[in-house]
Amino acid sequence: MSTSSVEIKVCLGTSGNAAGGEEVLRLFRHYVFDRAVEARIGTRCEFRKVGCRGFCSKDVLVDVIINGSKTTYQSVKPIMVERIVDDHIVGGGPIPEWMAGDEYTSFHSKQYKIILGPCGEIDPENIDDYIRMNGYRAARKAVTKMTPDGVIDVVTQSGLRGRGGSGFSTGEKWRICRGQKNDTRYIIGNVGEVNRALAEGNPHAIIEGLLIGGYAIGAQKGYLYIRERYHLSVERLRTALDQARDKGFIGKDIFGSGFDFNIEFSFGTESFICGEETALMESIEGKRAMPRYRPPFPAEKGLWGMPTVINNAETFSNIPLIIGMGADWFSSIGTAESKGTKVFTLSGKVKNNGLVEIPMGMPLREIVYSIGGGIAGNRKLKAVQVGGPSGGIIPESMIDMGLDYESLRKVGSIVGSGGMVVFDDEDCIVSVTKFFVEFLQRESCGECTPCRIGTKRMLELLIKITDGTGEIEDLDTLNRLSGIMTASSLCGLGRTASNPFITSFNHFRDEYLAHIRDKKCPAGVCPALVVFMVVPEKCKGCGLCRKACPAGAVTGEIKKAHDINQELCIKCGACYKVCKLKAIKKQ
């Protein structure tokens, strides 16, 4: 084989590592050098670790680029590496059966990856890769050629809204903070769960955005707030910070402008409440993470009583692009009120799970069916929950709505943390609602009565309903509780904790009534309301159900119809799942 360049890129985000990416990369190096590929191709073969591309279910993803021609392999295991080297890199023939196919193409084709794009292309541990794609150019422009107010004007005109919660104008928040009569100000980047891929794949974008924000508001110190267990995110952000300091992008007299700015880590707890910005500040100050009363708002009186801006890592990752490309460029993406793109985690009953970036306003149908590839097992879509645990449950009948701040607010949901879970007709919406409320009740800090007592009482009532002991009056109580919590809880957790119930009850009222009046779970999920029975005319006596039953409730002889002892049955559904003849029914 005669060629001039070979490059091998291996996805090494958290998912890629879990799938064996480090070993895959090691073996590529081993076999390439073992085959003396360098001598054959007459140039140095480059190996590059890159961040997550979002299609986590197909990791390890590997690009083999020969003379600029790229072939992407999916689900690469260490045992496959030798053949890829021999057949493709040395022999010149790609291996079709291992190549990424239509699923990979459809997953990416409808996305608009302006901040996730670099994550699968550059080495996150090499600042020179980031600089080659114009990294820190926007920061230099802001600090040396623009006034702080000029930076804030551009961010405001772009229409960028905070990507971590209620969607407040980023530029307005910065302007309020800058306008305070204090010499000391702080700026904080919250690296939450959805932001891990950004931290792992393009950490310098977060740092550059934080730097520009610090300059704009007049802060000399910034914090990266992150959970310590996000080991890979912490490692790559730490490496990126060290590299940025070595280049003079962080520290004293940045770009010779006289502007000083430093960034340090603050490691958070596992508490969900730390997503609330005042609780986050309490955590940084070394206190128990509990929300503060507002006003004053953090931009007025925040960390240690000083004006403070808090945005999440996704928001900051947009800043270098806005300063570099201009406000008009950014505002041309999305809708009239919701500009730009948004990152979501697409999970649940879709064929293609992963991390996606879409233009604001994209119809939910396109996300589920074009990007997500449709419902797993070709079942019927039932609902989509958007916005994380506090988000709303959107029914299939509203699948054509656009995904933006205004549209979601109208249906009782939020953009929130960017979670998106798809449910099919085998899911029980009442049980799903109970799951989310249980999480929120557990994560409530307990500071205010409406949330502390409200979430607990909501959970108790939902448990009653799924256990078959619910009453119609319980629905009235749940509705009253929802109104009280929304109106009087101290922070966003309590005010949105009832969203799963309100939206699910509005759209799936019949399912609640079936649980209460008919004592049935239409989806056959709630154990107390399900009876598993053998259909004698279908049962061939194969014995699979008897072997699968952990309680010994299934009896019968081989080649004769079996039976289920209802007194012994624990309603686990193991028999139903293993029966290949559909001889067991739920009712």
Image (tube, rainbow, N blue to C red):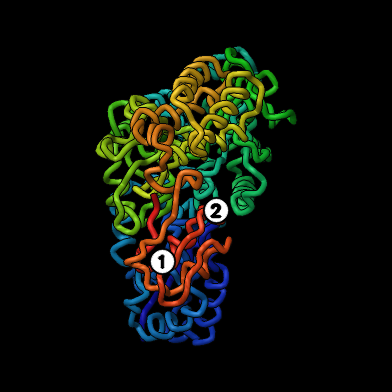
**Mark 1 belongs to which amino acid?**
Cys
**What is the secondary structure assignment of the residue under circle 1?**
loop
Residue 25, x across and y down, in percent: 53, 71
Side (left or right) of 217 relative to 58 = right
Instruction: State which quadrant residue 253 falls in.
Output: top right
Per the image, the residue denoted by label 2 is: 567
Q: Going 39% across and 70% down the picture, which residue do you hit? A: 73
Residue closer to the observer: 114 or 470: 470
Residue furthest right as drawn: 286
Q: Is residue 452 above or below residue 66?
A: above
Residue at figure coordinates x 48%, y 76% from the top left:
44
Local crowd at mark 1 within 10 Å, few (<14), some, or many (≥20)? some
Placement of 386 over or under 91, stated as above or below? above
- x and y, in percent, of residue 13 in the image: 52, 57
Nearer to me, 446 or 228: 446
Number of dots carrying numbers:
2
